[in-house]
Image (spheres, rainbow, N blue to C red):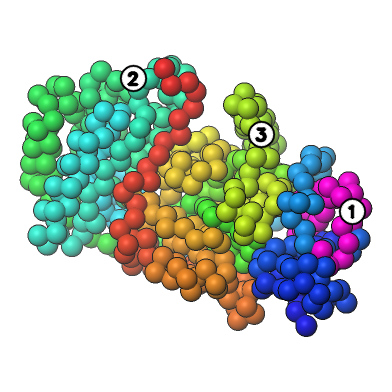
Amino acid sequence: MFNIIKLNEKDNIGIAPMEIPENTKINFDIVTKNQIPFGHKISLQDIKKGSFIYKYGQIIGTASNDIFPGQHVHSHNLIFSEFDRKYEIKSKKEIQQEKNDLFFKGYKRENGKAGTRNYIGLISTVNCSATVVKKIADKINTHLLNNNFENIDGAVCLKHSSGCGMNTSGHGMQVFNRTIEGFKHHPNFGKVFVIGLGCECAQISLYQNDLDKDKVEYLNIQDEGGTREIINKVTKKIINNLEDINSIKRTDIPVSELTVALQCGGSDSYSGVTANPALGFASDLLIKYGGSTILGETPEIYGAEQLLIERANNKEIVRKLLKQIDWWKDYTSINNSSLDSNPTPGNKKGGLTTILEKSLGAVAKSGTSTMMDVLDYGEQISSKGFNFMDTPGFDPVSVTGQVASGANVVCFTTGRGSCFGFKPSPSIKIATNTNMFNRLEEDMDINAGKIMDGESTIEEIGNQIFNKIISVASGEQSKSEINGYGDDEFNPWVIGATM
């Protein structure tokens, strides 16, 4: 007999931990009416057409027709539906902070921030300078391969397709400028060059300020005499400065200086059962030691925002979160879409059916800690602890905002499989199921599928993630770093018309 997993007493569906054939007896004294794919839902009782369907004890949609016990529940009989979100801002328990005596080996910067890597950053202000920053980075990385600078992780070119053809005073430009500023001052960079063409909307004069003036230099291709001239000039500057960049050494830094981006991509039905709650446990543990975490992807908390609101530190950030969601409703509407257009085909193949179901699983990454602040895209963290950030659901754009905010490590859960990396912040990838972990082991750092297999608990995998965060922050290479990912994922959020 096969055992179906029921996550909450209120649920009227269960999850198949493996593929189950038709006419097979399962627990709850039910016989399957049709084949149930791995990770998909099965009805545990009669569900009338128009009735809510529950998973995690929460609404994930409405039955589009009568559903009988043992039937496969998916897109053919489960549809998205709006419902009243009921929430109450609960009184917060004082978190018992652990002693600040747990450390990682990091790079302490002159401005007091802590880096987990020591990269040289080459930031293009516009797509027109993308080729130049890439060629400079390639030259520096070739030089580093042939020379011993043990405290330099490499050169990173942050190239993109934006920076011009936009309203120079609009919301989109404000978001773009905030993103560039965040990377310019990121603690994982030991030296930064901001390079423009010279005639773009995102003029380098917008970024030339007195902060970190010894760390950041600004140049335009047009001012320097063209492509070859600026490549040679900047390459020479960097090579002459390598000894100084290499002079910093890793030292003991409290884990309270870690800021972790909580991210997921290629999610499946197990994401909210294994990897995401385990990452949530690790997030809570980091916060107990004084650290910070950032959850993003506003379109992928839709339908579960009430769970975050109940954890809000104050009413002001609740208003800000609800305003962000209203903005997204309008934004998707004027682009002939809606927030329930999610999940993706891959998500659905993995067993997810509606955005409500996907969001409930995604929110689990944030654990149970108080939501201290709600940030705009790329806004710098000002409150230690758990923060939410307004970002799109597209992983590279979302992580770009989180890292701009100061995230010096990324934790990325995946059920379908992802090869994501993001320089300058190392990415740790966490598999939701053992089948995928075994198939893509060269890309996965941790197998949270052991929870579903009954080999580990959420707490055990959560502790494993927490320890991996510390070891990777201290210099251990993650799988994405070993495979060379992270050079092409920088993707600032483009908002508004391209003109």
* Quarter of the figure with residue 441: bottom left
| Type of amino acid under label 3 | Ser
Q: Tell me, yes or no, whether the highlighted magenta stretch contains residue 54.
A: yes
Helix or strand or loop: what does disc 2 sit on? loop
Helix or strand or loop: what does disc 1 sit on? loop
The residue under the point 77% across, 58% down is 73
Horizontal side of 146 relative to 395 (left or right) equals left
| Nearer the observer, 497 or 250 | 497
Q: Is residue 454 above or below residue 129?
A: below
Residue corresponding to mark 2: 201
Q: Is residue 278 above or below residue 494?
A: below
Horizontal side of 165 relative to 296 (left or right) equals left
Q: Say the numbered circle drawn on residue 66.
A: 1
Look at discs 1 and 3 and give the one toward the viewer: 1
Instruction: Point out the stretch of residues depicted in magenta.
Output: 47-71
Decide: few, some or many residues near mark 1? Use Cα within 10 Å; few <14, some 14-19, many ≥20: few
Q: Tell me, yes or no, whether the highlighted magenta stretch contains residue 471.
A: no
Q: Which quarter of the image is occupied by the C terminus?
A: top left
| Type of amino acid under label 2 | Cys
Decide: few, some or many residues near mark 3? Use Cα within 10 Å; few <14, some 14-19, many ≥20: some
Horizontal side of 307 relative to 50 (left or right) equals left
Q: Position of residue 207 (x, y in %)?
A: 31, 27
Q: Say the numbered circle drawn on residue 338.
A: 3
Look at discs 2 and 1 and give the one toward the viewer: 1
**Magenta stretch: dominant secondary structure:** loop
| Nearer the observer, 196 or 181 | 196
Disc 1 to disc 3, how far (Cα)?
26 Å
Q: How many marks?
A: 3
Which numbered disc, 3 or 2, marks the residue that appears first in the sequence?
2
Q: Position of residue 304 (x, y in %)?
A: 71, 47
Q: Is residue 19 above or below residue 122?
A: below
